Amino acid sequence: MSIMQIIALLITLAAIFSYINYRFIHLPTTIGLLLISLFISLGIIALGKLGFPMENMAKDLLKQIDFNQALMQGMLSALLFAGALHVHLDELKKQRWVVAILASVGVITSTMIVGFSAYFIFPLLGLEIPLIYCLVFGSLISPTDPIAVIGILKTIGAPKSLETKIAGESLFNDGVAVVVFLALLGIAVGGDSGHGEVTVSSIAWLFAQEAIGGAIFGLVIGYIVYLLLSTIDNYQVEILLTLALVFGGYSMASALHLSGPIAIVVAGLMIGNSGRQLAMTEKTREHLDNFWELIDEIFNAVLFVLIGLEVLVLTYQQNYLWAGLIMVVVVLLARFIAVGIPVSLMRLNTTFTPRIVRILTWGGLRGGISIALALTIPAGEVREAILLITYVVVIFSIVVQGLTIGKLVASSKE
């Protein structure tokens, strides 16, 4: 199939599944689409066991889709921009230390806890995965996914300060996690990561280049587009400028070996705050919000359908599944520790929402970014194991945590 035919098929499935969910199931859109896609995938697998050729046909189709490229070099930039566009900078400044610590120290702490725990647990299940790859798994499963998190936050009516903490952390920590992941994967494959020999100094330079460089680059391109927006009053052209910022800026950041996600988040914050207030008319703001909300909904729908369908191409072994279920608990415990320690220290001079550690722990959803990173591990048995384990954690996170986080937030208001 051609690229256009694949896109047409995914959009058609997303539309049909969205209708079914809205008309009959009434779940949050992302969760509903994921569950329907999962049931369809499991149904195709069951038919394949009965001798029908649908499973092989579906697998051949999905093998034509590069999930990592589709998300990390395609949809991610638009989804991050749409999320950042509605984060209030004043509120984010109030929560800056919480967000910064959780997005950096929290990710690294969780990576270490998950990685070393996996190294001791996996052999008990017959999985001989080297320590460095266990740490690679820890790095890819530790960041909370802004796409999943923001999609759920829209429906639960969280207090603004809590929403800013969760959304702000999730928007920034994937950029930090990608840097940690690249460094660890570089060590795992013997330094062949495109960044030369892997040393402590090279890792520090990689972090500075990717994360800090990405933030500076985001400020520059965001400010340029802000200046352009302030000189015209035509919402069609202004929306085109934001599209150029998102896709052109992300591609340029990647070409310069800077963090595209961090660059787009920073640019989105600038356009969503200074740009919205000083460079746009009310008519432009309305059209811009409607446009990016629609883009967000469409890309989210396609992404979660794709996550559900990708289950068809996983390698299933019983010990992989058991490892995944155990890692669900380990990842939650690691998140609890990585959140609990800094929050407990910051309580000395900061006021937090009641039950904040439990909310941040349970609200730290994992999603497509973890899967995309797992797919960049070199092909082999280690990747197949890590990929299925990652899928188990992600699906539990989106479905179980996503469906229940609203009740936990509501209980914190009582």
Image (tube, rainbow, N blue to C red):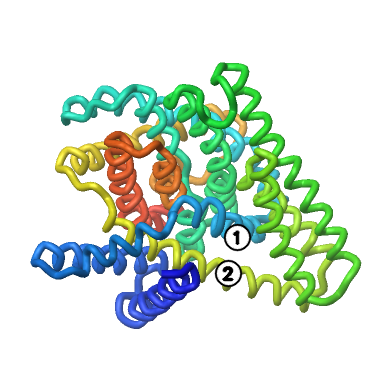
For label 2, the SS is helix
Amino acid type, residue under disc 1 in the picture:
Ala
**Decide: marks 2, 1 in contact (CB < 8 A)?**
yes
Amino acid type, residue under disc 2 in the picture:
Ile
At a point 25% along the width and 68% down the height, the residue shown is 40
Q: Which mark is residue 295?
A: 2
Quadrant placement of the C terminus: bottom left
- Note whether residue 328 is visible: no
Where residue 81 appears, as percent x and y from the top left, is 63, 57
Q: Nearer the viewer, residue 326 or 371?
A: 371
Q: Is residue 354 left or right of residue 126?
A: right
Quadrant placement of the N terminus: bottom left
At a point 22% along the width and 64% down the height, the residue shown is 55
Q: Nearer the viewer, residue 207 or 24?
A: 207
Question: Where 241 falls versus 387 (above or below)?
Answer: below
Label 1 crowd (10 A; few <14 / some 14-19 / many >=20): many
